[in-house]
């Protein structure tokens, strides 16, 4: 009888140990999975930003060739340069707002020259940039969702214990600047009186 009791206790201890190890492995894997997904979605945004910058290079090259007015494309070139140098999600969000503003200003100024050769091709490039911008916005939404899940998970018990050992810290969200939260004044931008 004592032998059977000893075997049952040993079996329970071994089974408990196996379950504890399995649970620890699952905790570890879930944190690694979320961290990798955050990095993957950030890389997806980077890829789209590079595509956008390549398209902007085409728009700027056209502007230099067709519009012999430096002030027409300098703002766009500066915004593109700042966007390519942005490192953090916050810097990228700020740079992207400048690119969008510069592109909008550039497009409205080019519309003043409807007889330029290649204008339709340039507007096609501008539309391509706008489509990429929409893609970037969608990818940022997904990225922010994953970051929220990651940040929440590393603060929950028992994940917090393992997250601290792995050195995980909160990831930064993409957030709009304060100026972007205000409704734009299109009448002022278009030069129309209310």
Image (tube, helix red, strand yellow):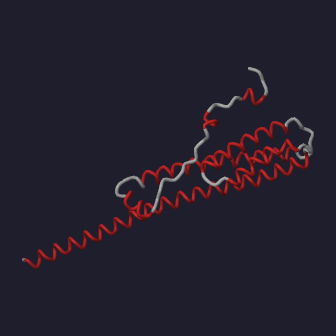
Residue 63, image x and y in percent? 86, 47
| Residue depicted at x 51% and y 52% | 147
Q: Residue at x 71, y 43 (%)?
A: 98
Quadrant into which the N terminus falls: bottom left
Q: Which is nearer the eye, 13 or 169?
A: 169
Percent coordinates x, y for residue 11 in the rendering? 20, 74
How many numbered marks have been drawn onto this rendered protein structure? 0
Which residue is at a point 86% across and 49% down the rendered structure image? Answer: 62
Residue furthest toward the left? 1
Quick one: which residue is furthest to the top in this view? 194
Relative to 109, does residue 169 appear above or below in the rendering?
below
- Where does the image place residue 82, in percent across and percent down from the top left? 72, 50
Give me the residue at 46% from left, 52% from top.
Answer: 151
Q: Is 178 left or right of 193, judged from the image as shown? A: left
Answer left or right for 119 relative to 89: right
Q: Is residue 190 above or below residue 104?
A: above
Q: Compared to 57, does 165 lie above or below?
A: below
Q: Position of residue 16 (x, y in %)?
A: 25, 68
Say which quadrant the C terminus sits in: top right
For residue 177, side relative to residue 103 (left or right): left
Quadrant of res 101 = top right
């Amino acid at each position: 009888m004592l032998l059977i009791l000893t075997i049952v206790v040993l079996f329970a201890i071994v089974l408990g140990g196996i379950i504890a190890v399995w649970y620890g492995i699952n905790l570890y894997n879930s944190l690694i999975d979320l961290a990798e997904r955050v990095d993957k979605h950030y890389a997806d945004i980077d890829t789209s930003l590079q595509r956008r910058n390549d398209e902007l290079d085409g728009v700027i090259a056209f502007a230099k060739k067709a519009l012999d007015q430096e002030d027409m494309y300098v703002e766009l070139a500066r915004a593109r340069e700042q966007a390519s140098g942005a490192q953090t999600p916050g810097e990228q969000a700020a740079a992207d707002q400048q690119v969008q503003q510069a592109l909008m200003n550039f497009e409205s100024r080019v519309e003043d020259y409807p007889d330029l050769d290649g204008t339709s091709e340039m507007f096609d490039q501008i539309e391509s940039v706008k489509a990429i911008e929409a893609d970037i916005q969608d990818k940022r939404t997904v990225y922010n969702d994953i970051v929220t899940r990651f940040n929440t998970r590393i603060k929950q018990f028992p994940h917090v214990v393992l997250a601290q050992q792995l050195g995980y810290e909160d990831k930064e969200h993409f957030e709009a600047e304060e100026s972007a939260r205000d409704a734009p004044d299109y009448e002022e931008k278009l030069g129309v009186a209310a």
